[in-house]
Image: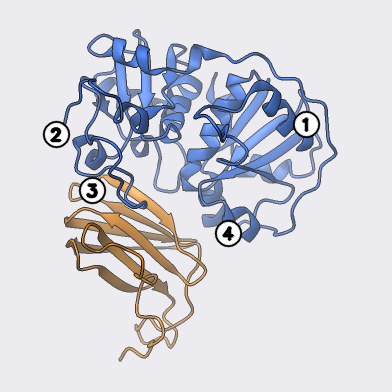
Chain colours: A orange, B blue
Amino acid sequence: MRTCGATAGGPDLSGIDLSTQTIIQGVILRDGEGDGVPNGAPVGNAYVRLLDSTGEFTAEVPTNVDGQFRFFAAPGAWTLVILVSGAREERNVTAIKGNPVNLVIEI
Amino acid sequence: MSRETSLVSADWVAQNLNNPAVVLVEVDEDTWLYEQGHIEGAITFHWRDDLQDGLIRDLISKEKFEALLSKSGIGNDSTVVLYGGNNNWFATYAFWYFKIYGHGDVRLLDGGRKRWELDARPFVSAATARTATRYVAKERDNSIRAYRDEVIAAIGKSNIVDVRSPAEFSGELAAPAHLPQESGQIKGHIPTARNIPWSKAANEDGTFKSDAELKDLYVGAGVDLAKDTIAYCRIGERSAFSWFVLYELLSVSNVKNYDGSWTEYGSLVGVPVAIGA
């Protein structure tokens, strides 16, 4: 069961015009209790890569000190690739304008 | 103009941390990264505050470049090694800048910050102090810089390489997806440009692909290396990355970076624009 109440996902969305922007964001966390649940420490300076529906690279950001990242994408299917020293994760997401994708990813 | 003279590995940098002839310079898009941690002994240039004129849209003048390098403790005989975040985008932009002003020995750390971090190599947080020098730059070498009129003249004649993502090329996005989407420019690309995203030249860890893979990439996409080539992106830093690949790694001499790029071209009145893949 998720217990990370303070870390609901990516950065604060206030100030973002959700009527025009299609957001994919989230937070990268360690599996704190060894139970497969991402409730551990945030992973800063992870590299998050955004690939389009054909697998083509579109953008990359490092996570901030709170482990968070954000992309301004277009509606549709995307893949996230998360790189840290010694580990790699992938997630498939569908982005919708006005309704941010907000992920909590364990690594 | 070869991989041997323009690119160094993380191992090489680690072995030369105390080499007084080597000056490490970090150039990031996210300028807070340097303060958070950088390679021991590195100084930093701010891509906007240090490398943009600030009043007009242009490179800084020769005199300002000389002042920047002098106060940074870079000599004319220094081996400058550039690196940065974002797969070395702004580091390759700075590399191009050093070539514009004729610096003798400038190199790039293969993979930049990302490869260094993925290798779990150390960063330090203390800023580096260096003794000032009296740097003397050469006049600008405009043989590696394209301006808008020659870009328009190159349509249908020379190679034009759009190195942005497919979504920016087609007109779906106006800016890279880690930035808010702008509305100041028309969306699309320069007619007859081939879309060869900068990222296809790099491995996932930020290092460059092999020379054979790189040559296949450009030739396979229809670039005739015997013709003149102009690379562009949105503001000229990703295209500096692809310019580096063509000019330095593949030793193709007639390649220019159009640093006005889409933020200039997409604002011009009356020029032709294409959309779609």
Q: On the picture, is B272 further left or further right than B51?
A: left
Towards the viewer: A6 or B188: B188
Q: Earlier in the sequence, mark 4 or mark 1?
A: 1
Q: Secondary structure at mark 4?
A: loop
Q: Secondary structure at mark 2?
A: loop
Residue neighbourhood size for the residue with mark 4, other residues' Cα within 10 Å, grouped as few (<14), some (14–19), many (≥20): few
Q: Quadrant of the N terminus of chain B?
A: top right
Q: Are marks 3 and 2 on the same chain?
A: no
| Three-letter code for the amino acid on which mark 1 is drawn | Ser
Q: Earlier in the sequence, mark 4 or mark 2?
A: 4
Q: On the picture, is B150 further left or further right than A64?
A: left
The disc at residue B70 is 1
The disc at residue A55 is 3
Residue neighbourhood size for the residue with mark 2, other residues' Cα within 10 Å, grouped as few (<14), some (14–19), many (≥20): few
Residue neighbourhood size for the residue with mark 1, other residues' Cα within 10 Å, grouped as few (<14), some (14–19), many (≥20): some
Residue bearing the label numbered 2: B276
| Three-letter code for the amino acid on which mark 4 is drawn | Ala
| Three-letter code for the amino acid on which mark 3 is drawn | Gly
Towards the viewer: B213 or B228: B228
Where is residue B83? Give x, y as percent.
Answer: 58, 41
In front of the other: label 3 or label 2? Answer: 2
Q: Earlier in the sequence, mark 2 or mark 1?
A: 1
Where is residue A16? Give x, y as percent.
Answer: 32, 63
In front of the other: label 4 or label 1? Answer: 1
On screen, residue B45 above or below B275: below
